[in-house]
Image (cartoon, helix red, strand yellow):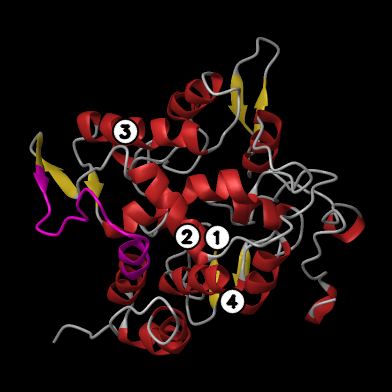
Amino acid sequence: MASGGIPLYNPTVPVDTTGEYEYRPPGPNDKRGPCPGLNALANNGYIDRSGITNSAQFGVACSIIGIGADACTVLIALAALVGNGPVFSIGEGSPETGLGVGKSGIENGDTSYKSSDCALNPTPDGGCDDYSFNDTAWSTTYNAAQSNGNLFNMPTFTASAYDRYINSRANNPDFFFGPMQFIFHYVTPALFDLVFSNGTDGMPTEEIENTWIGITKDENGQRLGIPGGGRIPDNWYPRKIPVNLIDGAKYILGLYLPHPVEFGVNINGRFFPSLYQLGASPTTKDILCLIYNTICGAASVTTLSMIAADLNSIFVSGSIGCTSYTPKA
């Protein structure tokens, strides 16, 4: 058991979804946001059900579902970008929690697989809803899966990742796609495929994805999002070998290389590519160093001082061999 009584990673038994860890939908004041994994962890009580968590609690929960220590460290660093010290909200933020995952522009960017772009789904208060389930967006991935044995794996996401990018760039007048958006756009399928699939067979089926994400169907078969997100499936086992950063980078390459895309922004109906581009044939190291530099570059001075040592130990001092990040003057 981890501190606080939370179970540790154990691929030989199913993750507990009973008693203290049974699914409970969020209450009216609980925070939920764009990340299906975070929503499910909160709904099952592996992070605080309020949706306000901290890096230590999240790190344990991250490992329980089969994510390796190095990848968990990177996810904790990303959480620190939107948090207040080690504390962060998985949904909307506050002065106590920082920006929060839900309204930061860090994770809930354009080209989402399950949600609308912000500019395409305005709300009456002048904001937007870019985190709720949107079946039009999800249909791109669903239809690709139908042509791939109904599996939500790399062949499916190779098609839908490119299609979501092209659709968003063509239809969203405020489309923006930079390195941070690239990371989440291509890491999300790795989560859906490598992490969400049941460790018993490794098959990312529609049933598994619907349970984690929180998708149901009405009496006419129309897909609907469950308010507050999904849950950890019952009798669900984590992977026998946790997903590490190298696994993630290789998965990203598998999606990107068949259909390279550009960083850039739409202005007045015209797409302007960024000066920096990843190119058509990046390596695993290129992907990993992009992740490292993007996180460091997005961090405030205070946040960078919190996360730099852990990131440097993985990306610079370790076998990856990235050049140490130097803040711009």
Q: Is residue 183 visible in this depiction of the protein?
A: yes
Per the rendered image, the range of residues in magenta is 272-289
Q: CA distance from mark 4 to mark 3?
A: 33 Å
Question: For the residue marked with disc 1, what is the amino acid?
Answer: Ile
Q: Is residue 132 left or right of residue 26?
A: left
Label 1's element? loop
User: Around disc 2, counting alpha carbons within 10 Å, would you say few (fewer than 14), some (14 to 19), or many (20 or more)?
Assistant: many
Can you give x and y, in whole percent of width and height, for residue 1 in the image? 85, 76
Q: Are marks 4 and 3 in contact (CB under 8 Å)?
A: no
Q: Which is more N-terminal, label 3 or label 4?
A: 4
Q: CA distance from mark 4 to mark 1?
A: 12 Å
Q: Relative to 60, is 241 above or below?
A: above
Between residue 125 and residue 135, name the one nearer to us: 135
Can you give x and y, in whole percent of width and height, for residue 7 in the image? 83, 69
Q: What residue is rendered at 87% in x and 60% in y?
A: 20
Q: Are marks 2 and 1 in contact (CB under 8 Å)?
A: yes
Question: For the residue marked with disc 4, what is the amino acid?
Answer: Ser
The residue labelled by disc 1 is 90
The residue labelled by disc 3 is 120
Label 2's element? helix
Q: CA distance from mark 2 to mark 3?
A: 20 Å
Magenta highlight on residue 308: no
Q: What residue is rendered at 35% in x and 38% in y?
A: 117
The residue labelled by disc 4 is 55
Q: What residue is rendered at 58% in x and 43% in y?
A: 193
Q: CA distance from mark 2 to mark 4?
A: 13 Å
Q: Is residue 298 left or right of residue 275?
A: right
Q: Which is more N-terminal, label 1 or label 4?
A: 4
